Image: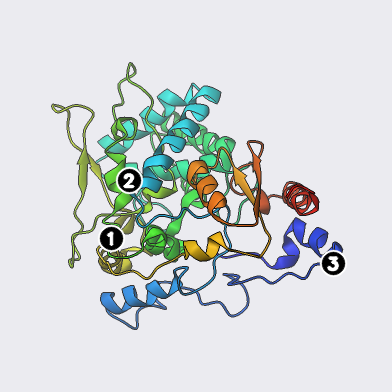
Amino acid sequence: MGCKSPQNYGWTERVLDKGYQILFLDQRGTGLSETLTPRTLSFAPPQQIADHVKLFRADSIIFICGGLAPLVDQPDLVYRKLFVKVAERNQAYYQKYPEDTERVKNIVRYLQSTKTAVKLPSSGPLSIPRFRSLGINLGFHGEQSLVFSCAIDAVHGVILRMAHELDYFGYFTRPTLAEFESLQSFDTVPLYALIHELIYLQGNNTSAWSADRMMKEHPAFVNLSTSSDEDPIYFTGEMQLQCIPQRNCNVYRHRTFTSNPSAPSQIFPSTFSDHDELRPLADAADILAHTSGWPALYDEAQLARNDVPVYTSIYIDDMYVSFDLAMATARKIRNCKSFVTNAMYHNAISVAGMSDELVKELLKLRDDCLD
């Protein structure tokens, strides 16, 4: 995802005032950073595109990100933990907006029954999995983030508008579909979808569409029943970006989920077929999902003897980085001090009025006299 220029972050001035210099490493989206789209990658067949995308992992460039990366070799454990956190955020959503339980089911019911696919302004279809991926916003603060408008209230606003239009018109208007799309359009960030599971891989492991496999362990996310006496339909989080395209083929294989064995099948289209900009990259994505032989990402022995002071923030309710795994990483880094809080979410560093407070807390760690 593209980053804003340094002067647009509230914490920049505070850090400079403290006498520090700031070096933005791999500041994606600014300067001469390369934009990846199907068009800019059209120079090569899928295998070469896959090889090119590998260069954007942390073993080739330096990453600075929200939260400490888990020291794992494969993403299954990460997604297994994150599905639990996404479930908690769904529960918080429906607790705040209980009337949305039936509204969401009405929308899903409409998407199930419509004979013609609902087309979004970008030309991609509004499938049920794409609708549920609104949940990627449930872990953000309530201001504009780097790419996504965010938070529970923004999701509710779209749900309320969609439900109203179904009642009044029997369909969704273009302005409403445009607002929906602005909350989770991966068409503008194809690298995010391509590399999402690969950032955890080391050695001879493969991702093999880990998020899709791990979702089976959480029945609440498999439930798509629109019956009023059933549990709410859960939104998915960022881990449910991935697709399962038929390997080496331009025809996409779809998974089927049912709330009970006798119910009609519910089609679950892949993200790479739902988004027009991602569709040409589906074969490359599948190659990457089944690739092994990854270089090591972290040298734990070096982390254990690290001499550089490290000050980090870890969010207890982070929906995108497992708190448990982040704390485990912090314990393995010598000279690492952590600001641990349940008063901030994952995007705090980019939220006006909050980023300055976050940096203030990190500077306190530097000034602390604890050995």
- Find disc 2 in the rendering and name its residue: 127
Determine the CA span between mark 3 and mark 2. 51 Å
Query: How far across and down, in percent of the image, does residue 24 sit?
Result: 66, 70
Instruction: Report the disc number at residue 189.
Output: none
> In the rendered structure, which disc, 3 or 2, sits on the residue that comes first in sequence?
3
Q: How is the image coloured?
A: rainbow
Q: Nearer the viewer, residue 202 or 299?
A: 299
Determine the CA span between mark 1 and mark 2. 28 Å
User: Compared to 218, does 232 lie above or below?
Assistant: above
User: Compared to 96, does 308 lie above or below?
Assistant: below
Q: Nearer the viewer, residue 288 or 131?
A: 288
User: Compared to 1, does 217 lie above or below?
Assistant: above
Of the residues shown, which amino acid type is indicated by label 1? Answer: Thr
Residue at the location (36% across, 22% down)?
231
Can residue 341 be seen here? yes
- Find disc 1 in the rendering and name its residue: 206
User: Compared to 327, does 123 lie above or below?
Assistant: below
C-beta proximity under 8 Å, tags 3 and 2: no
Q: Nearer the viewer, mark 3 or mark 2?
A: 3
| 180 sits to left or right of 333 | left
- The quarter of the picture where residue 9 lies is bottom right
C-beta proximity under 8 Å, tags 3 and 1: no
Q: Nearer the viewer, mark 1 or mark 2?
A: 1
Of the residues shown, which amino acid type is indicated by label 2? Answer: Ser
Which residue is situated farthest in the top direction here? 229
- Find disc 3 in the rendering and name its residue: 19
Query: How far across and down, in percent of the image, does residue 95 sit?
Result: 52, 23
Query: How far across and down, in percent of the image, does residue 304 sit?
Result: 54, 59
Of the residues shown, which amino acid type is indicated by label 3? Answer: Gly
Q: Nearer the viewer, residue 310 or 12?
A: 310
